[in-house]
Image: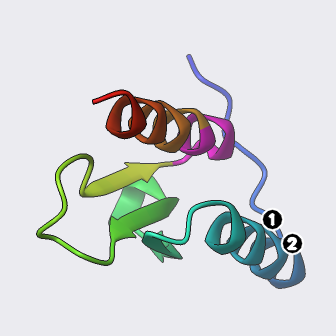
Amino acid sequence: MRATPVQPDDETVARHLARLTTAYPAFRFSRELFGWKGCRWVAERRDHSVRGLRVVITDDLMELHATLRRDGDRCHAG
C-alpha cells in the first residue's frame, strides 16, 4: 500500500510552479484537486500544434520533471 504523500503548503506550491515555468516554458503548470485522489501536479503544453507531450498529470513532482525532461530530449533529438 502506498503511503499518503504530505501535501505542500501554498508557498511551497508557488515556488515549485515558478521553477517549473522557468525550466519548461512551453508548458503551463498548476496544482489541481482530482476528487478523492487528492491534489496532482498538472503540466499542459501552451501550443497544442507542437508535436510531443501535451498533458502530464501526476502526484509525484520528480516524475513530472523526469517526464518533461524526456520529452524535451526526444523533441531535440528528432
The reply to whether the C-beta atoms of the residues labelled 1 and 2 are less than 8 Å apart is: yes
Left or right: 22, with 52 as reference point: right
Confirm whether the magenta stretch covers residue 16. Answer: no
Residue pictured at 68% horizontal, 29% vertical: 3
Q: In the picture, residue 20 is in which quadrant?
A: bottom right
Residue 70 versus residue 48 in the image, above or below: above
**Label 2 crowding class (10 Å Cα cut-off): few <14, some 14-19, many 20+?**
few
Measured from the top left, where is residue 66 in percent x and y?
58, 33
Point out residue 30 in the picture as x, y percentages from the top left corner.
52, 76
Amino acid type of disc 2? Thr
The residue lying toward the viewer, choosing from 17 and 26, is 26
Residue at the image position 55 percent from the left and 38 percent from the top = 69
As drawn, is 68 to the left or to the right of 5? Answer: left
Residue where numbered disc 2 is placed: 12
Magenta-colored segment: predominant secondary structure: helix
Q: Quadrant of the C terminus?
A: top left
Amino acid type, residue under disc 1 in the picture:
Pro
Choose top left, top right, bottom left or bottom right for residue 43: bottom left
**Residue lying at the far top of the rendered structure:** 1
- Magenta highlight range: 59-65
Instruction: Identify the secondary structure beneath mark 1.
Output: loop
User: Is 62 included in the stretch rendered in magenta?
Assistant: yes
Look at the picture and state if 2 lies above or below 6.
above
* 3D distance between C-alphas at marks 1 and 2: 6 Å
Q: In the figure, is residue 16 to the left or right of 45?
A: right
In the rendered image, which residue does mark 1 sit on? 8
